[in-house]
Image (tube, rainbow, N blue to C red):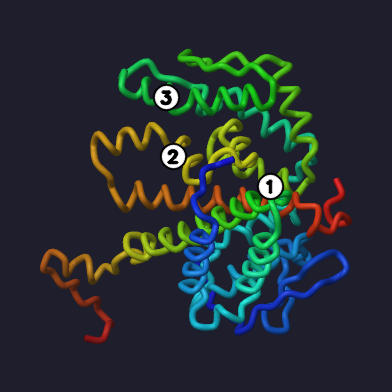
Amino acid sequence: SERKKFYQNVSISQGEGGFEINLDHRKLKTPQAKLFTVPSEALAIAVATEWDSQKDTIKFYTMHLTTLCNTALDNPTQRNKTQLIRAAVKFLETDTVCYRVEEPPALAELQKNEWDPVVAWAEKRYNVTIGSSTSILGPNIPASTKETFISHLASYNMWALQGIEFVITQLKSLILSMSLIDRHITVEKAVLLSRLEEEYQIRRWGNVEWAHDYDLCELRARTAAGTLFVHLCSESSTVKHKLLQD
Amino acid sequence: MAALGAPLCTLRVLLRELRHAAGCSYCDSPIYRHLLTAFRAHWVTSEKLCRTQQELHFQAATYLCLLRSVRKHEALHREYHGRGERSPQEVAGLVGFRLPQQPGEKG
């Protein structure tokens, strides 16, 4: 449901805990009524732009950065850092790019050509073994591989981790998410690789704008927002560390 | 590092997207000023800041993807999903019927 736009001006101010968003004279609050404060000025500007871009009604479903900030501030699932990391790494067991088909041969070939390079990149970059599988049980990921990713993710602060976990659930792949966050591939490429089978079927059977393009744009928007959120929350030059205590 | 094309091209398309989103007053907006400041700061300096330039370019390309995708998604939503349900009168009208008058209702 949509709410009517109830403000004229959007501005940013700096408070004790970080940067705040003002809608006219009112300070923006989270769904749990906490003061909306973000650690990065660039992130605050981007959130303010989301609010400023609304026309007659407020379309919350388009305001992905605001939603991510609300999740980081309210933590509605009540997860701590360890739980978030565990949820993220668990995705590796069912990672999209590790699950291969045998039929039809054209799709199997496409998966090999498009996904093998990114798996190889991850194995090299993180010095781990991942592999892929055509079995219904998926690949057998060594414990050491999981440990490596767990300790890598632990180097991110809580806000960035919320963003990383969000991107992983959108792309259904830890490997594609890390590839994106490490700036090895673009958002468009990551989404394409995540939707490889859909793209294959679309090319065979045709595109349905109201379903395929709709899903594609939504996935791109959410993945782009998540990635930007992670990067803006990880930059040390513009981030107020006090807010990001784990 | 992902293949991104020319940074100034990305910036130009990004500013165009912002103009769509913000309307005429986008030149005064914080986001416009922030982007120009960031690009100016990192593009007149030497090679040693190459990594920062790449990171900034990647961020700009990601933000552009966000704005573009939100705009397209919203347009598709308006086109295909925004109309809501038809009223019973409209549904009847589709097949050439009119709903009967209920007793007590005004004509």
The lab-note entry on whether marks 3 and 2 share a chain reads yes
Q: Which residue is mark 3?
A: A113
The crowding category of the residue bearing disc 3, from other C-alpha atoms within 10 Å (few below 14, some 14 to 19, many at least 20), is few
Q: Is residue B11 left or right of residue A30?
A: left
Q: Depth-wise, is mark 1 or mark 2 nearer the camera?
A: 1
How far apart in space, not on screen, are marks 1 and 2 (Cα)?
Answer: 26 Å
Above-or-below relation of B47 to B79: above
- Outermost residue to the left: B96
Identified by mark 2, the residue type is: Leu
Q: Amino acid at mark 3?
A: Asn
Q: Residue at 61% across / 32% down in the picture?
A: A174
**Subunit bearing disc 2:** A
Look at the numbered disc 1 and give the secondary structure of its residue. Answer: helix
Dot 2 corresponds to which residue?
A192
Q: Is residue A220 visible?
A: yes
Classify mark 1: residues with Cα within 10 Å, few (<14), some (14-19) or many (20+). Answer: few
